[in-house]
Amino acid sequence: METRASESSRPESEPDGEQLATVALDDDRRLAYAEYGRSDGAPVVFLHGTPGSRRLGELLDAAARERGLRVLAPDRPGYGRSSPWPTRSVNDAGEFVGAVLDDADIQEAGLVAFSGGGPYALATAATHPERISRVDVVAGATPPDVGEVTPAVQRLLSGLAATTPLVLGGLLRGQAWLASRLGPSFVVAQYTTGDAESVSDDAAAVVRADFVEAFARHRRGAVTEFRHAATDWGVRFDDIEAEVCLWHGENDANVPIDGVRRLEERIPTAELRAFEDADHLGTLLRAVPDVLAEHR
């Protein structure tokens, strides 16, 4: 698909202070992205989870400023303010990551991905190796053929995406409605195995805002990606040239670590760094400072 990065709106401040820009992917689709950290820093693209939005990038903001990094966090197609692209594949990720880099006048950048953003980070590194200097996947999803046990919730969502996408869209609409009216713990509990109250109030507020924004205009991004989760990603791991680090928690119930160990064996440049007592969200919160330090 031809990108038209020149047809863009430069970053503007939203009422809440968010720096938001949009770039045209084609005549019908636009992609939104936010900036965090330092505007003059070394560039890093951050890919949110499934579901998710650019708003999760706020969790990286303080550490990015301290380390002199510029974080570009897009809404993947069908999330937040980005147009749906229901026919995209995992390997199309390089198209929208490349469009963001072009719009920001960046030739090469690091990639950081959380959870369901992992497949799209690895696909970008495989299909556009000249644009990606390093990849860090935090609590990342794994291909369906590497895990012996898929959590029941993931099986349900992927099954609905494949067989009854309208039903899944309605379910997600209901979850978003509840999340917008209940406290942050309603969302945080989906990513933790222990006490959701252990997550700081500020981090919990970001996680809630991320979830609500994911469905602010569409549900199709999540439906598309839950379908991807249950099928062959099509990523040629041998084509990845950049260094890859997989950061994962031993107590991650959303993505069991055994599958991550098998994924590490498939990626020639990969290294696994495990946290003994971290769950899904806890891994992200603990890993961010060290992850960003690798991109200075």
Image: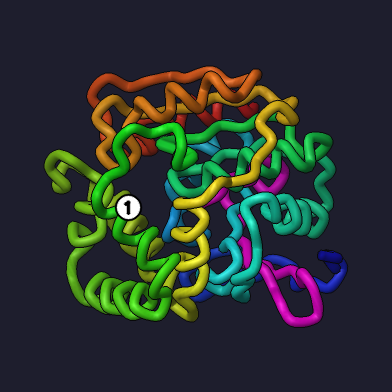
136 in relation to 124, above or below = above
**Quarter of the image where the C terminus is located:** top right
User: What x and y, as percent, mark residue 135?
Assistant: 62, 32
> The disc labelled 1 sits on which kind of residue?
Gln
Label 1 environment density (alpha carbons within 10 Å; few <14, some 14–19, many ≥20): some
User: What x and y, as percent, mark residue 149?
Assistant: 29, 37
User: What x and y, as percent, mark residue 130?
Assistant: 83, 36
Q: Locate residue 250: give its quadrant.
A: top left
Front-most of residues 146 and 196: 146
49 in relation to 10, above or below = above
Residue 46 counted in the magenta span: yes
47 on left or right of 87: left
Q: Magenta residues, as a range?
A: 20-48
Q: Secondary structure at mark 1?
A: helix
176 on left or right of 87: left
Residue 208 counted in the magenta span: no
**Quarter of the image where the N terminus is located:** bottom right
Residue 57 in view:
no
Which residue is disc 1 drawn over?
154
Main SS, magenta region, reads strand
User: What x and y, as percent, mark residue 274?
Assistant: 37, 20
Front-most of residues 48 and 264: 264
What residue appears at the point 44 percent right and 32 percent down from the top-left corner?
A: 146
